[in-house]
Image (spheres, rainbow, N blue to C red):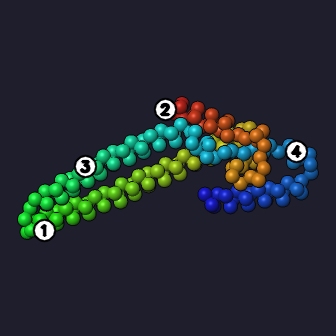
Amino acid sequence: MKKLAAFTVLVLVVAGVWMSGMPKASAAADKIGYVEMATVFDEYLKTKEFDKSLEAKGTQKQAEREKMVNEIKKLKDEAELLSASAKDEKQAIIDEKIKSLQEFDRSARSSLGKERDNMVRDILKEIEAVIQDYGKSQGYSFIFYDRALAYKSEGGNLTTQVIKVLNDAYTKKK
């Protein structure tokens, strides 16, 4: 995200220098707009469906974890009733179950995190492609992300149009 912000600032500076050297009539003909990327991302139907899917997987992982925790509790309760030598054997089993639980937690976090990162990357690529296509088809010279703008008027906000194009295309694919 920092690279994106730095790139956007660089583009703004270059565009400013370029436009300052142009005659006023040419600069007035340029169409410039911006997109609220966070809003587009959040309102994209594919993002919403993915969030539901990831939440369901997280709930499933949590249920599996709870089973493991309950099993460990049960083993600890059983160990309380045993003799010292039998307790040591039971404790070894408990320790192994705890290691398994820790590995499960690490693995679950890692796999869900990777899945989320990959999907976010894919969704952002789709959004960027739609923004580029929209800009070309509507005759825009520049479309910026809103976070890098010092000033913006609502007249240049293309967020709603981009969301509509994305969601219409996604709905047709289904």
Q: Are marks 3 and 2 in contact (CB under 8 Å)?
A: no
Q: Taking the image as drawn, is residue 139 in sight?
A: no
Horizontally, residue 110 falls left or right of residue 164, namely left
Task: Name which residue type carries label 4.
Answer: Ala
| N-terminal-most mark, 1 or 4 | 4
Is 159 drawn above or below residue 122 in the view shown? Answer: above
Residue located beneath label 2 in the image: 174
- Residue 174 position in % (x across, y down): 49, 32
Q: Residue at x 38, y 47 (%)?
A: 58
Dot 1: what SS? helix
Task: Name which residue type carries label 3.
Answer: Lys
Residue 67 has which mark? Answer: 3
| N-terminal-most mark, 4 or 2 | 4
Dot 1 surroundings within 10 Å: few (below 14), some, or many (20 or more)? few
- Specify the quadrant that holds the N terminus: bottom right
Quarter of the image holding residue 3?
bottom right
| N-terminal-most mark, 3 or 4 | 4
Residue located beneath label 4 in the image: 28
Q: Residue at x 58, y 48 (%)?
A: 125
Q: Taking the image as drawn, is residue 88 in sight?
A: yes
- Residue 7 position in % (x across, y down): 68, 59
In front: label 3 or label 2:
3
